Amino acid sequence: MSSLSSSPHCRSYSSAAYPISSSCNYGHHRTAISSISLKQLLPRKVSVQSNTKARPNVVPSEDGAVVAPIENETPSNKLGDGLLSITLPEEFEDTTSFDINKDKSTVSITVVGASGDLAKKKIFPALFALYYEDCLPEHFTIFGYARSKMTDAELRNMISRTLTCRIDKRANCDEKMDQFLNRCFYHSGQYDSQNNFAELDKKLKEHEGGRISNRLFYLSIPPNIFTAAVRCASLSASSANGWTRVIVEKPFGRDSESSAALTNALKQYLEEDQIFRIDHYLGKELVENLSVLRFSNLIFEPLWSRQYIRSVQLIFSEDFGTEGREGIFLSLKYFDNYGIIRDIMQNHLLQILALFAMETPVSLDGEDIRNEKVKVLRSMRPLQLEDVVIGQYKSHTKGGVSYPGYTDDKTVPKDSLTPTFAAASLFIDNARWDGVPFLMKAGKALHTKRAEIRVQFRHVPGNLYNRNFGTDLDQATNELVIRVQPDEAIYLTINNKVPGLGMRLDRSNLNLLYAARYSKEIPDAYERLLLDAVEGERRLFIRSDELASAWALFTPVLKELEEKKIIPEYYPYGSRGPVGAYYLAARHNVRWGDLGLEQ
């Protein structure tokens, strides 16, 4: 694979510390070489793992990569063969020295916690999908690291069971799979052992073959051992001459205090730009499309404010409970300790809200986008107890089938008050959104599975056709729906006349159903986020100040719920959730959009 990838499906990978071009269909931007800002190429703060002291003739670059400077460089650089001569300011001299030769660097990806369900079912399949699409660099190695005793062959056999060439069932699937598995290796070790990570470091160096080594560690492990693993990886297995990055899975604490403690602990060994806090919902296609929909379509941007929008609803529901869910995303012990507010609302839904409500960023640069998200979060009112409704599902029999309640599981305490459902009303106190309720609803064991954003517009003032709708003006409300999953779609509900001699009105959808419009299968969120981490693209990852602002909104009400031992409202398994959620919406003179005709 050349430095500028020839694959039509994937944005290219640059062997330098800077991504130069984007052409991957999974990607979200295209950048011509000539359009790179010189500011982007300036050396950034040196990583604490960079071994630059031993190399006096190197220049630190982004994420700690080091490159050799051009000797005898002068401010005036003359290009031979009659090419244009250019003069660079002194502050830009070092930016001419980075090397884009593909043979000079390699990427080593270490999955820490490789024997777990998340690694087997999500991370390794995502890496294979990237390899299948030629989205990984030519020189790369994948290592699994866990406490389990395992050989390279046993690791390959384990992950091969979850790999599939799901993309259009193209040819050479078996061949590509064998090639990928031959790049996968395993090292057994303790998560808190510097010696074990030092042994891993030796193996990584053998495969890196003297090239500039860029290393990515994915922590697919419980949060209580994050710090120990980061310490050992940082001190014993960091790259000596390239970048080192660490992907951290949620939960990022369970309140403001524990989150700040985790952040401070990680920053003892890593710089902020080395930490990639992953929220897989931000990698979903429709969430990615949110800013495109708003900022590249003139029809929507003028309407995106309190003047035209009556309410915004973020809805997440699952049609199953926590039974049988030990493994990939949660265990019952984890869920009972965290609950639905911490598990879904404080991260997934709040991140989508911030993307939805932010002002136009200066550019698509990750820092510019995250700056605007932080402004939104800092403008929001902290949640009060009266703004929240919590529930817990109980057993229910339907169609002769009995469904267990949350506390019926033997691993859950019988007196558990952990909410499996929550609804909340939030407000953003700024000029654009003042007074607009942002309603969140998330729950398990509900009647359907969905994740969507519903934008309800205001009623038409002095509507000439009010009498045709009767007393229920909500029937005439225009609504924009962005369905994140399942059956990804964007549709706009409008009013129109039913053909005929009478004047009968109907609600219809202007519908973009992704499955009907696009033949290409939508990539998994982990594919996009892993590729971004390799390329150093941070806009879909959570920054520490962003995380602190998010916890500041929810921590007071979470503490109050636990200290006062608020009893959740019980709802039957497979129902629409607690009645209290509807009263919460009615208090703001709106109704939940998922109760309408369009299900």
Image: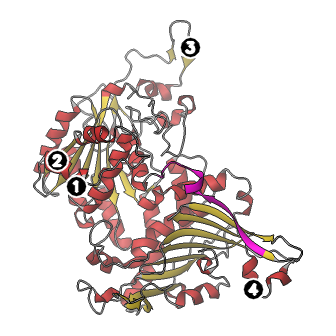
Mark 4: amino acid: Asp
Residue holding disc 1: 114
Give the number of the disc on residue 559.
none
Q: In this view, does 332 lie above or below 96?
A: below
Find residue 405 and report its image quarter. Answer: bottom left
Q: Which of marks 3 and 2 is in front?
A: 2
Left or right side of 244 for 568: right
Mark 2 and 1 residues: CB-CB less than 8 Å, in contact? yes
Label 2 element class: strand
Where in the figure is residue 381, as x and y percent of width and height?
56, 76
Q: Earlier in the sequence, mark 2 or mark 4?
A: 2
> In 3D space, how far apart are the residues under numbered discs 2 and 4 (Cα atoms)?
63 Å
- What residue appears at the point 33 percent right and 67 percent down from the top-left corner? 329
Label 3 element class: loop
Residue holding disc 3: 85
The one of 217 and 175 positioned closer to us in this rendering: 175
- What residue appears at the point 46 percent right and 25 percent down from the top-left corner? 93
Q: In this view, does 400 lie above or below 330?
A: below
Q: In this view, does 560 lie above or below 377?
A: below
Find residue 558 and report its image quarter. Answer: bottom left
> In 3D space, how far apart are the residues under numbered discs 4 and 3 (Cα atoms)?
71 Å
Count of labels in the image: 4
Mark 2: amino acid: Tyr
Give the crowd class for mark 2: few <14, some 14-19, many >=20 residues within 10 Å.
Answer: many
Mark 2 and 4 residues: CB-CB less than 8 Å, in contact? no
> In 3D space, how far apart are the residues under numbered discs 4 and 1 (Cα atoms)?
55 Å
Quadrant where the image shows the C terminus? bottom right
Give the crowd class for mark 1: few <14, some 14-19, many >=20 residues within 10 Å.
Answer: many
Residue holding disc 4: 472
Mark 3 and 1 residues: CB-CB less than 8 Å, in contact? no
